Image (tube, rainbow, N blue to C red):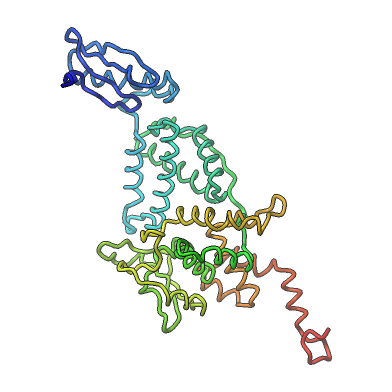
Amino acid sequence: MPKPRSNELVQGRYFRWLLGKRDGIYVADGRSNTPKLGRYSLETGQKDEALRALQELDLTMAVRHGLASPDLLKSDRSQLLPLTEGRKLYERYVGRPAVANGPKPATAKRYRAVLDKFVQHCAQNRVRYWNEVNRELFDGYAAWLDDESYAYATEYLELTTLKQILKYLVSIERLHASALFPYPMRKPTGTDTYCWTPQEVAAILKQCETPELAWLRSLTLTLAYTGMRISELAQLRWSDIDLQRRMITIRDESTSRSSAGRERRTTKSGHSRTFPIHPDLATSLEAMDHHPDGVVFHGPLGGKIKPDKVRRSLIRDALTPLAPQFPKDGDEPGFIDGRLHSFRHYFCSTCANAGIPERVLMDWLGHRSSKMVHRYYHLHDQESHRQMARLATLGSSDPGSG
């Protein structure tokens, strides 16, 4: 039988160590790591003191091998704030109730999505503390978002959220004021969202006609025929759909009593809205199975709709295979640059071209005012000329004869 191990295995934040005693003094052995770290006396016979010394040794070795910021060695260890702990503090803060001026649940959920990605990026870069977050890390995170094909407005939102988190952690004195740093950004103006053409949307729907992508087809068809936001679609319930009257209601429940086991649903405008169902969409909805949870749309494995996963599936399974059919024109955004929000722009554009009154469309989309809607109603010069040509010329009763 193998000889029982007399040393204790201790997993530090960066390395693994064997903790043992020699002549009554604790010794840390890091030779099993890559790179091999050697063996060190912790200069104490008390275990609690040895463990504290081991934490210090673990960090020192991490800095020496480029796995941690040298600034951490200058900091008071008691002031180090792990990413997980700082995240809990901020999520507790944004999770306060509406009566305490807390943000909407959808906003808090968006913050969680930002933190999910940021913490993942930090782990890949061996960053474990909020004290290590700096301009260089922000630059790297922005570049990573770029590589993942996120829109400029999304990148702006993510970095702005992280700046707010740092500011909050400083305000509650969990970080020193020196943790804040200037990070100027150019605010998004206008939109860089690509608006798909009817031919491109038709191609996407056809691409998703396989059994494996049926879930994506029903989802994209609904986005194209309603202009809903993906967050609204993900929360849509069968109780929101009246197939007899052919109407859909998007509900804002921010001031309602929450149902047991279910989050209150909110809209960006803070108001509920109702709009008609297109006949083609009604046919699609009537053919769908009803899930026991009452939610209309689910992912490929039957789980909840997660916007990031839908976005990745859209790019991988539809846009990339179809890209050769719709090549880009120079440096301008093209078909391959479209994203889930492009369906909202497509819906807006088709409504404008169909002559639906601007005020009606804004009600359907849930806007009190909208630069996006205004853009599609006032920048379609070719369509304006075409409509003008339909008018009867003076002295003629035949429309378009002139």
Q: Is residue 145 visible?
A: yes
Q: Is residue 32 above or below residue 219?
A: above
Residue lying furthest top: 23
Left or right: residue 81 compared with residue 359: left
- Dividing the picture into quadrants, the one containing residue 99 is bottom left
Residue 74 location (% of width, % of height): 39, 20
| Label tally | 0
Q: Nearer the viewer, residue 367 or 350?
A: 350
Q: Is residue 74 visible?
A: no
User: Residue at coordinates 63% horizontally, 57% vertically from top-left?
Assistant: 335
User: Residue at coordinates 68% horizontally, 54% vertically from top-left?
Assistant: 328
Residue lying furthest front: 1
Left or right: residue 239 compared with residue 193: left
Q: Is residue 361 above or below residue 73?
A: below
Give the position of the C terminus as an image quadrant: bottom right
Residue 126 location (% of width, % of height): 42, 31
- Dividing the picture into quadrants, the one containing residue 87 is top left
- Dividing the picture into quadrants, the one containing residue 167 is top left
Left or right: residue 364 compared with residue 10: right
Q: Nearer the viewer, residue 196 or 253?
A: 196
Residue 319 location (% of width, % of height): 57, 56
User: Residue at coordinates 34% horizontally, 58% vertically from top-left?
Assistant: 98
Q: Is residue 126 above or below residue 362?
A: above
User: Residue at coordinates 44% horizontally, 44% vertically from top-left?
Assistant: 117
Q: Is residue 298 above or below residue 44?
A: below
Left or right: residue 393 compared with residue 118: right
Give the position of the N terminus as an image quadrant: top left
Q: Nearer the viewer, residue 185 or 327?
A: 327
Residue 153 location (% of width, % of height): 55, 51
